[in-house]
Image (spheres, rainbow, N blue to C red):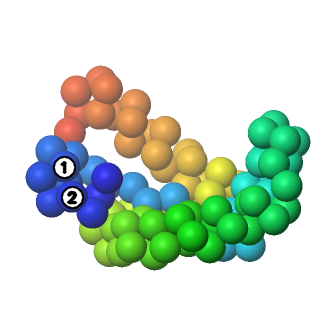
């Protein structure tokens, strides 16, 4: 989404949640096997054919447009608290930080 300039202009704050590539692929493998009944081979083929190229083309480059980058994804409690506070301020009408 952040790779599209028209969309970026509509956003008050842009957040990129960064997760280690090893964690991303392991989550994908487990999910696809457990929830979708896929094989390792099919996951591998899809990852190399579409997932990785699309991530490299659209997701990773959008990081440079982020106002805030939250490392370690959902495990970053400080980052989550920061976003919570900003969201609460925004929802209450306080946009002094924008």
Q: Which residue is mark 1?
A: 7
Residue at the spot 12% in from the left edge and 52% down from the top edge: 6
Q: Nearer the viewer, residue 75 or 95?
A: 75
Structural distance between the alpha carbons of marks 1 and 2: 5 Å
72 with respect to 84 (left or right): right
Dot 2: few (<14), some (14–19), or many (≥20) neighbours within 10 Å?
Answer: few
Q: Which label is found at residue 15? A: none
Q: How many marks do you count on the picture?
A: 2
Q: Is residue 72 visible?
A: no
Residue 58 is situated, as x and y percent measured from the top left of the image, at 37, 67
Residue at the spot 29% in from the left edge and 33% down from the top edge: 90
77 with respect to 22 (left or right): left
Q: Is residue 4 visible?
A: yes
Q: Nearer the viewer, residue 18 or 56?
A: 56
Q: Which residue is mark 2?
A: 4
79 with respect to 42 (left or right): left
* Discs 1, 2 touching: Cβ within 8 Å: yes
Residue at the spot 45% in from the left edge and 67% down from the top edge: 54
Which of the 4 quarters of the picture holds residue 37? top right
Label 1's element? helix
Q: Nearer the viewer, residue 11 or 61?
A: 61
Label 2's element? loop
Residue 2 is situated, as x and y percent measured from the top left of the image, at 29, 58
Residue at the spot 38% in from the left edge and 42% down from the top edge: 86
Dot 1: few (<14), some (14–19), or many (≥20) neighbours within 10 Å?
Answer: few
46 with respect to 12 (left or right): right
Residue 73 is situated, as x and y percent measured from the top left of the image, at 62, 58
Residue 77 is situated, as x and y percent measured from the top left of the image, at 66, 52
């Amino acid at each position: 989404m952040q790779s599209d300039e028209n969309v970026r202009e509509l956003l008050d704050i842009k957040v990129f949640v960064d997760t280690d590539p090893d964690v991303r692929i392991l989550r994908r493998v487990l999910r696809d096997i457990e929830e979708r009944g896929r094989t390792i081979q099919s996951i591998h083929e899809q990852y190399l054919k579409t997932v990785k190229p699309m991530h490299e083309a659209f997701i990773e480059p959008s990081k440079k447009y982020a106002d805030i980058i939250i490392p370690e994804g959902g495990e970053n409690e400080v980052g989550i608290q920061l976003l919570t506070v900003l969201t609460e301020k925004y929802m209450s009408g306080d946009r002094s930080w924008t």
